[in-house]
Image (cartoon, rainbow, N blue to C red):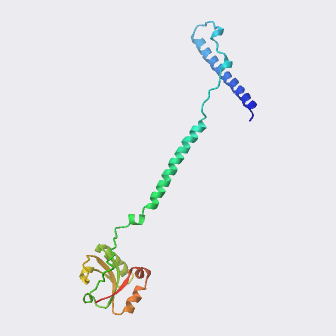
Amino acid sequence: MSEKTNEEKLKILQERLATIQHKKEKEQQSITEKNKPVAPVFKEDLVEKSNIKPSKKEPKEKTNSLKYFIIFFIIALLGYGGFSAYNSINFDKLFSSETKEVTTDKTKKITYHKSEFIGNYLIILNSFEDVTIANAEVQHYISEGYKCDVFQLSGVSDSEEEIFQTYIGPFNKLEEANQYLNSTISIKESGKVIELQ
């Protein structure tokens, strides 16, 4: 837009404001005339309407857009923080029951006593500190048709660890133990064939 059109628009706006002001003054004057006795009006008391200038107020759009930007920024910040927190929490570990699986000392070879079992080989599955969790695993494998049980490691071996181990077996032949070891993925991944001494 050119400067001329802006000046014309400003003049039109000033005229409209003057008209509105004039109407308001007439309404107020008529109200006061009804309530007061008539008094003479002098020229000095009248307001010159040509000196009226429009007030310069900041448009509401700028303040509203700033508010919306701040709100959006806060929501985005909270969303990013929530997403980061969600990714850093291990929900499987948080909501699962405390199944603390124990790993035995790998450097020391444990000797399992043959006198405790009728057979030559066992498949050792997992080690647990809690016997109830070990029994739950035993029940799972028994329901799938395996001959499974649990023992305390210090009772059947030369180890002094007070943990419980689940096992499948015993087996008389190594080939039979290996066949059971390779029967399912879960047994193959967690199981280990040991020879009884």
Q: Residue 53: horizontal and vertical position, in percent?
A: 65, 23
Q: Is residue 176 left or right of residue 25?
A: left
Q: Quadrant of the N terminus?
A: top right
Q: Is residue 189 left or right of residue 130?
A: right
Q: Residue 102: horizontal and vertical position, in percent?
A: 33, 74
Q: Residue at x 41, y 66 (%)?
A: 92
**Count of residue discs:** 0
In which quarter of the view is residue 148 placed? Answer: bottom left
Q: Residue at x 47, y 55 (%)?
A: 82
Q: Residue at x 74, y 28 (%)?
A: 8
Q: Residue at the far top: name it.
A: 40
Q: Residue at x 64, y 7 (%)?
A: 42
Q: Residue 31: horizontal and vertical position, in percent?
A: 59, 15
107 or 155, nearer to the observer: 107
169 or 139, nearer to the observer: 169
Check the image and report above or below for 23 versus 132: above
Check the image and report above or below for 137 versus 197: above
Q: Residue 59: horizontal and vertical position, in percent?
A: 61, 34
In which quarter of the view is residue 40 placed? Answer: top right
Check the image and report above or below for 65 versus 104: above
Q: Quadrant of the C terminus?
A: bottom left
Check the image and report above or below for 12 versus 114: above
Q: Residue at the far front: name it.
A: 107
